[in-house]
Amino acid sequence: MAKLFGFSIEDKNNKSDKLVSPVPKNNEDGVDNFISSGFYGQYVDIEGAYRNEHELIKRYREMALHPEVDKAIEDVVNEAIVTDLYDSPVEVELSNLNASESIKKKIREEFRYLKETMDFDKKSHEIFRNWYIDGRLYYLKVIDMKNPQEGIQDLRYIDPMKIKYVRQEKKSNIKDLTIRVKSEKDDVPSPQFDEYYLYTQKPNYPTGMVVQAGKGAVKISKDSITYCTSGLVDRNKNRVLSYLQKAIKALNQLRMIEDSLVIYRLSRAPERRIFYIDVGNLPKVKAEQYLKEVMSRYRNKLVYDANTGEVRDDRKFMSMMEDFWLPRREGGRGTEITTLPGGQNLGELTDIEYFQRKLYRALNVPESRIGGDTGFNLGRSSEILRDELRFSKFVGRLRKRFANMFNDMLKTQLILKNIVTPEDWKQMEDHIQYDFLYDNQFAELKESEMLQNRLSNLATIEPYIGKYYSTEYVRKRVLQQTDSEIEEIDMQIEDEIEKGIIPNPAETDPITGEPLPQEGESATETNGNVLGKSLEDEDEDDAAGPTVDAQYQKDTKTAEL
């Protein structure tokens, strides 16, 4: 195999060679492109839908030029990528990462550097749109081969029409990489693959022509390219698809209906006259001559020119698309002029609206967004359409898939700069999340109302906590808190109590909300008060106490006498 251009990241403790299986490791994008002798493996489409990946991409890009499709794409991109004057569209979230603060700080700095390198804050809309339309995204990670520890120097976008991801099975002489089924004769080899990319400066295979490495194509190592797909795969044809694939048929139907509607309206809109000319017993030749003379006599004097927009005098006969001239023999009703009415259902657009809704359903965009004149209702969540909630979840899945691009770039940058090792990255990558700016009012309203309902249920069930319900049951079933959320909330409460942000519930009266008395104070004393009396009043009572006792004794003695 020829030497690859680029670099490769190798795990020193890689133990994959000892794992033997007749089934190869599943590729992340679900596509297996097998080639032999350095050639592309080509799929022959008998139905003529598409012959190769490049025709698919061209079709997707042509679809994006259609107004309805472009509007739907913009709705998706605007929901997924929210731009703000002060905040970045995406930030790295490391709250679930079990690492030191210094490592987290370095990860945030490197992620910020990668965004600046690809100018993501300014080009985020275009980058996400290209990925959504094409269904795939390629970036070349440029590094200094002499000083790889400096990390990624540049990130360059590659047109998917110019690059191809290839998995080629390689022959291995390692006897250990076999699986014994029954006997030695039935040994099944464990397949091994070489993964790389083929890049051409000009896409010279638009019609399915094969390209061989070294003949107009450059081999690039797998680690040198960031490859992010849509996640949609045609398993029958081993092709990565775009989210526009489902809308191909709906768009073609909408185009045909619109074209037929225009043709019908142009042909049926005007009223036409029918001239029945009495030619008597004239022979055929003379009858045709007489008909032309009559047509010349009643020719159009004024004609509308569609090119210039002018109404001018023209010597031409009336167009046969406008009027009909028919000869009538002797014995008929003579010369007659009648009117052929135009189309009566020209204002009906039911079929157009149907195919528009079908197109939007195929693009996973709510049908309510078709009409641009409809207002934006911020009512109760019960009034929110289910399609909007489904659309919000769809955008969330797109963000998750698109974030794989950042994950691959961040992995390369951290490993090259010796911030983490390949072994550490395998443990860390599942805990690194990406926080996108959110701007979906429907989902926000839904969450707000759900929180209000939970708090209302909590207030209703609170008197029964400790009698019929436990605190853990209420937190999990009523408030819908997970174990991780409960643990995180408890830690935050303890931290805020220590800092004095909130009072300690154990030292607070649950009825009055006042702090409980400390040691050495009376049980009825609270902040120097005794049953609503101040300390000064208490002193006055103590001073008057002996006088009252003396008077009581005197009255008692008098009563005895």
Image: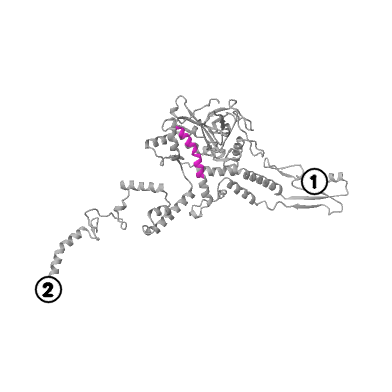
Distance between mark 2 and mark 1 Cα atoms: 147 Å
**Left or right of 269, for residue 438:** left
User: In the depicted view, which residue is nearer to us: 488 or 235?
Assistant: 235
User: In the depicted view, which residue is nearer to us: 179 or 280?
Assistant: 179
**Left or right of 497, for residue 124:** right
Count neighbours of disc 1 (C-alpha within 10 A) and say few if under 14, some if 14 to 19, many if 20 or more.
Answer: some
Count neighbours of disc 2 (C-alpha within 10 A) and say few if under 14, some if 14 to 19, many if 20 or more.
Answer: few
Q: Position of residue 128 (x, y in %)?
A: 52, 39
- The disc at residue 295 is 1
Q: Position of residue 205 (x, y in %)?
A: 62, 31
Q: Is residue 233 visible?
A: yes
Tell me the quarter of the image containing the N terminus. top right
User: In the depicted view, which residue is nearer to us: 192 or 108?
Assistant: 192
Label total for image: 2
Q: Is residue 149 above or below residue 508?
A: above
Q: Provide the residue span drawn in magenta.
A: 395-413
* SS class, disc 1: helix
Q: Is residue 493 above or below residue 48?
A: below
Lower sequence index among marks 2 and 1: 1
